[in-house]
Amino acid sequence: MDRRTFVTKAFGASLAFGALAKTGRIFTPRYFEGNFAALPYDLVAIKNGEPDAMFDQGIQALGGMRAFVKKGNRVVVKPNIGWDVSPERGGNTNPKLVSRIIKHCLDAGAKEVSVVDHPCDEWQRCYSNSGIEKAVKDAGGKMVPGSSEEYYHPVTVKGGKTLTSTQEHEVILDADVFINVPILKSHDGTRLTAGMKNLMGNVWDRETWHRLDVHQCIADFSTYRKPTLNVLDAYYVMKENGPRGVSTSDVVTMKAQLISTDIVALDVAGAKLFGIKPEDVRYIGIASEMKIGRKDLENLNIKRISM
């Protein structure tokens, strides 16, 4: 089956993703040209609301989505859609949050908003049973499969110490704006999943990271292309048995959310919200030492919102 036929059968002709098949093309990642220093806050922390309503409040505090998305931009949203579980299991990013982010991007003038992940469970079931596929389509976004190596292109990680090259999904490489939307949860291999860990879903070969040094590789890849914006979903938080979880008994309903352009600050705050010390998550310390972002939350301008 050729690529266009595969995508059409999987998602329907309306996705028209076959147009992204650019065999042999050399991709150059695009970078957001906004002024992060002009933002009113370094990090926004919201609690006691629904995922979509919390994002409304958080993005407004940062000046609205127009501070990040310009008219005609191609936006890619990268949630965690790694697992074939329902939202209340806390394995994937909440679909309400993904939907609202898409709406804000389109209202800001985005030309298109694509959503992608490289799932661990069977990809079609992950996209469907997470609730994210329907949420994306209803919001006017476009689901993009990440299930074949054909979609991934070689990139050089110039700032990496252990990870110096990998293959990243073409829809992320082609985007003007990259919004990282992880879920906060436990992880049996890295202690915690948050912003930097979620970027593993951008690439094809994750096993190499584990064979080398997964913590160093996570930090290395975070030097490559920092997301325009990071939104940490902490509505349903899997406290045990991550990253997939066993049942809803692993999950607490925390009703919280963190938003920042600084992925390290986001993960430091996420670790504290989870109830552990940031230094207990080795990739956070490595990323701080590599000056990828800041861990000194006490010196950052943080907006706290309780709904």
Image: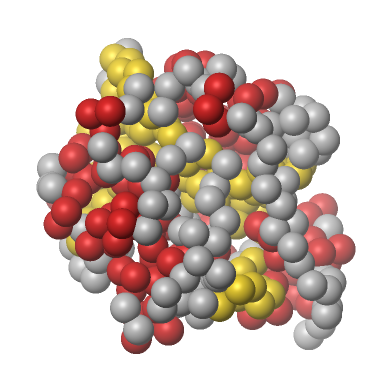
In this view of the protein, which residue sits in the foreground, 117 or 130? Answer: 117
Quadrant of the frame with the C terminus: top left
The image quadrant that residue 167 belongs to is bottom right
Does residue 101 appear to the left or right of 238 in the view shown? Answer: right
Does residue 26 appear to the left or right of 104 in the view shown? Answer: right
Does residue 202 appear to the left or right of 32 in the view shown? Answer: left
The residue at the point 46 percent across, 26 percent down is 55
Quadrant of the frame with the N terminus: bottom right
- On screen, residue 32 above or below 24: above
- On screen, residue 153 above or below 284: below
The image quadrant that residue 67 belongs to is top right
The tally of labels here is: 0
Q: Is residue 149 visible?
A: yes
- On screen, residue 164 above or below 290: below
In this view of the protein, which residue sits in the foreground, 225 or 106? Answer: 225
In this view of the protein, which residue sits in the foreground, 223 or 186? Answer: 223
